[in-house]
Protein backbone atom coordinates (compact mmCIF):
# COMPACT_ATOMS: atom_id res chain seq x y z
CA UNK A 1 0.00 0.00 0.00
CA UNK A 2 1.34 3.44 -0.92
CA UNK A 3 0.29 7.01 -0.33
CA UNK A 4 0.01 9.42 -3.22
CA UNK A 5 2.67 11.58 -1.54
CA UNK A 6 5.09 8.63 -1.90
CA UNK A 7 4.79 8.89 -5.69
CA UNK A 8 6.32 12.39 -5.67
CA UNK A 9 9.63 10.96 -4.50
CA UNK A 10 9.88 8.50 -7.40
CA UNK A 11 11.45 9.07 -10.79
CA UNK A 12 9.51 7.87 -13.85
CA UNK A 13 11.38 5.99 -16.56
CA UNK A 14 9.92 4.89 -19.88
CA UNK A 15 10.92 1.28 -20.61
CA UNK A 16 10.15 1.76 -24.32
CA UNK A 17 13.20 3.98 -24.88
CA UNK A 18 14.91 4.16 -21.45
CA UNK A 19 14.21 7.87 -21.19
CA UNK A 20 13.88 9.58 -17.81
CA UNK A 21 10.59 11.46 -17.86
CA UNK A 22 10.88 13.20 -14.49
CA UNK A 23 9.32 12.95 -11.06
CA UNK A 24 5.60 12.60 -10.35
CA UNK A 25 4.04 15.93 -9.38
CA UNK A 26 0.42 14.76 -9.02
CA UNK A 27 -2.02 11.92 -9.63
CA UNK A 28 -5.50 11.83 -11.14
CA UNK A 29 -7.93 9.98 -8.90
CA UNK A 30 -11.40 8.72 -9.78
CA UNK A 31 -13.27 9.49 -6.55
CA UNK A 32 -16.36 7.50 -7.55
CA UNK A 33 -14.38 4.29 -8.06
CA UNK A 34 -11.58 5.05 -5.61
CA UNK A 35 -8.89 4.34 -8.20
CA UNK A 36 -5.88 6.11 -9.67
CA UNK A 37 -6.49 7.12 -13.29
CA UNK A 38 -3.09 8.60 -14.22
CA UNK A 39 0.20 10.00 -12.97
CA UNK A 40 1.24 13.52 -13.91
CA UNK A 41 4.81 14.59 -14.65
CA UNK A 42 5.67 18.28 -15.08
CA UNK A 43 7.14 19.49 -18.34
CA UNK A 44 10.33 21.52 -18.30
CA UNK A 45 10.23 25.17 -17.36
CA UNK A 46 11.08 27.81 -19.92
CA UNK A 47 13.88 29.46 -17.94
CA UNK A 48 15.71 27.19 -15.49
CA UNK A 49 12.34 25.82 -14.33
CA UNK A 50 11.44 29.18 -12.79
CA UNK A 51 9.33 31.10 -15.29
CA UNK A 52 6.31 29.21 -16.55
CA UNK A 53 5.69 25.63 -17.57
CA UNK A 54 5.72 24.16 -21.03
CA UNK A 55 3.25 21.35 -20.30
CA UNK A 56 2.47 18.35 -18.17
CA UNK A 57 2.63 14.74 -19.26
CA UNK A 58 -0.36 12.69 -18.14
CA UNK A 59 0.40 8.97 -18.19
CA UNK A 60 -2.59 6.61 -17.89
CA UNK A 61 -2.41 4.21 -14.94
CA UNK A 62 -2.62 1.17 -17.22
CA UNK A 63 0.79 2.18 -18.64
CA UNK A 64 2.45 1.94 -15.22
CA UNK A 65 4.28 -1.41 -15.28
CA UNK A 66 6.27 -1.51 -12.05
CA UNK A 67 6.58 0.62 -8.94
CA UNK A 68 9.89 0.22 -7.14
CA UNK A 69 11.42 1.81 -4.10
CA UNK A 70 12.82 4.79 -6.04
CA UNK A 71 11.53 4.38 -9.60
CA UNK A 72 8.27 3.96 -11.49
CA UNK A 73 8.59 2.11 -14.81
CA UNK A 74 6.07 3.01 -17.51
CA UNK A 75 5.57 1.67 -21.02
CA UNK A 76 4.45 4.51 -23.26
CA UNK A 77 4.97 5.73 -26.77
CA UNK A 78 5.49 9.46 -26.21
CA UNK A 79 3.19 10.30 -29.13
CA UNK A 80 0.28 8.91 -27.12
CA UNK A 81 0.93 10.61 -23.79
CA UNK A 82 -1.85 13.08 -23.09
CA UNK A 83 -0.45 16.59 -22.66
CA UNK A 84 -2.06 19.44 -20.74
CA UNK A 85 -0.89 22.89 -21.80
CA UNK A 86 -1.26 25.87 -19.49
CA UNK A 87 -2.70 28.84 -21.35
Image: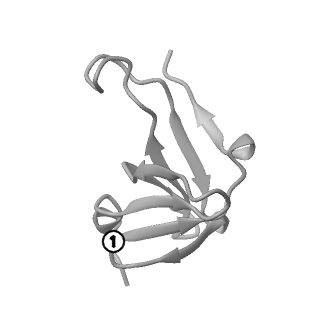
Q: Where is residue 67 in the image (x, y as percent from the top left)?
A: 46, 76
Residue drawn at (67%, 45%), measured in percent from left and top? Answer: 81
Q: Is mark 1 on a helix, strand or loop?
A: loop
Left or right: residue 30 compared with residue 76: left
Relative to residue 86, is residue 26 depicted above or below? below
Left or right: residue 73 compared with residue 46: right
**The quarter of the displayed image where residue 45 is located:** top left
Image quarter in which the N terminus is found: bottom left
Relative to residue 84, is residue 11 depicted above or below? below
Which colour style is shown?
one colour
Residue drawn at (74%, 45%), measured in percent from left and top? Answer: 80
Relative to residue 43, is residue 39 depicted above or below? below
Q: Residue furthest bottom?
A: 1
Viewer-proximal residue among 16 and 63: 16
Relative to residue 9, is residue 24 depicted above or below? above
Would you call the spot at circle 1 few (<14 residues within 10 Å), some (14-19), or many (20 or more)? few
Residue drawn at (33%, 71%), measured in percent from left and top? Answer: 70
The residue wearing badge 1 is 70
Question: Is residue 30 visible in this depiction of the protein?
Answer: no
**The quarter of the displayed image where residue 85 is located:** top right
Amino acid sequence: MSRTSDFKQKEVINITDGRRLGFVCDVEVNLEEGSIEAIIIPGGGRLFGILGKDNEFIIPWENVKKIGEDIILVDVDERYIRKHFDV
